[in-house]
Image (tube, rainbow, N blue to C red):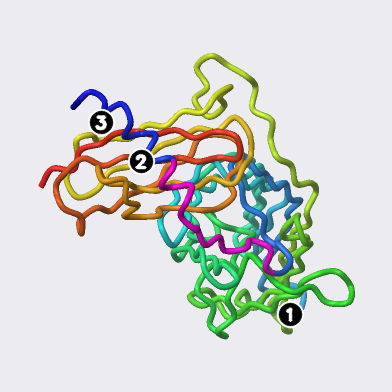
Amino acid sequence: MKKIILYLLPILIFQFGASQSVRIESIKRTNDVFPLGVHKTWSYSFQSYYSTCMDLGRDCSGKDDSGSVIYQVIDSTTYIDSIRWGIKVSRILVHHEYDHTMSFDTSYQIKDSSLFHLTELLSGNHQLIVDTLTDQINPLWPFLRQSCNNTYMNRYKNVDTTGYVYLSICVPGVPSYASFYTAYFIPDSGLKNIESSMSTITMHYYRTANLLNVILTTVPQQKNNSNIASDYVLSMFPNPFNCSTVITFTIPESDLITISIYNTLGQRVCNLVNRYFEIGKHSILWDASNYSTGIYFIHLKASSHTQVLKCSLIK
C-alpha cells in the first residue's frame, strides 16, 4: 500500500497543480526600453575629455579617452520579487593626459573589465536599481545609480512621438560639471545615446557614447558549457537544507516557466516564480524559513514539459 501511495503522489501533485488557478502578471506593460537577458550585449563608441586652463587657451592640463565600451549580461538569479543580473563591463580605450605647465604629455591603452550587479524589481514598471558605482566600473549607464533629481530608471516606459524615450539624469557624488546627462532609449534595444557637457572660460568637459550594436550573443555549443542544454534540468543545493536553498534549472528554449512548491498532501504552499525566461541556466533562491520541517516537492512547469524534484527541509 505504501509503495502505491508513493507511486501515485507525483501524479496527484500534477493533477492538483493543474486544477489550481495561477495568477499570471502580464509582462506586456509598456515598451521594454531596457531589455535584459543572459548573454545580451551592448557595444558603444565612447569619447570623453576634460581640460582646464590657467589662462585663456594657455597653461592647460587635462585628459581624454576614446574607444569602445561593451556591456554584457553574464548571469541572473531570480527571487520572488526581483531578478539580480550580473553585468560585465569591458573597456578598450586610448587614454591621453597632458599638463603644459609641467611639459607633460602621455598616451596609453586601457583594456580591462569589471563586474557589477543590477536588481530588477518584478512589480510596477520594473524599477532598475544598482549600488553606487565609479565611472571606471560603469562609465555609460549612470542612470542606474540613485538620482539626485528623483529620476528613476524603469525597464518599461512609454515612448514619445519620435519613438524614443528621453531621460534627463542628475547623478550625485560626482563633480558638478559631470553630474547632468541626457539619454535616449530605443524600445527592445536599450540605450541609444548618452551625453554630458559643460564649458566655462577656463574649463571644458564633454562625454558622449553612441550605440554601435546590440546582440543576443550566440554561445558556441560545448560539452563543458553548462549554460546551454538540449534538455530540461532541475536541481537544487543544498538538499537536505535548513531555511534556504538555491533551485537551479536549465531550459533548452525560451519559455514561460512556473516553479511551485508542494507538500506531501499535494497542496501548493508556495508559487516561487511565474514569468518568461530565456534559454539557458537560471537560479532562484527559496527562503523556507517560515515553513515547517518536512518533505516538499519542487514542481517546474513549462509549455510542453513538467518536472518534479523532491527535497527535505530540516530545522
Residue drawn where x is 32% and y is 51% of the image: 267
Instruction: Report the magenta residues as a range.
Output: 15-29
Gap in Å between the C-alphas at discs 1 and 3?
A: 78 Å
Residue linked to disc 3: 5
Which residue type does callout 2 highlight?
Ile
Q: Depth-wise, is mark 1 or mark 2 nearer the camera?
A: 2
Q: Depth-wise, is mark 3 or mark 2 nearer the camera?
A: 3
Question: Taking 205 as reference, is 81 above or below it?
Answer: above
Q: Which badge, 1 or 2, comes first in the chain's sequence?
A: 1
Q: Does the image show residue 90?
A: no
Q: Which badge, 3 or 2, comes first in the chain's sequence?
A: 3
Q: Does dot 2 land on a helix, a strand or a loop? A: strand
Work out whether residue 297 or residue 224 is closer to the camera in this orientation and state it: 297
Residue linked to disc 1: 199
Residue linked to disc 2: 298
Rendering coords of residue 124 (x, y %)? 56, 73
Work out whether residue 162 or residue 293 is closer to the camera in this orientation and state it: 293
Residue drawn where x is 23% and y is 34% of the image: 239
Viewed as shown, does residue 74 lie left or right of 48?
A: left
Question: Taking 235 as reference, is 140 above or below it?
Answer: below
Gap in Å between the C-alphas at discs 1 and 2?
A: 60 Å
- The residue sitting at the top extreme is 223
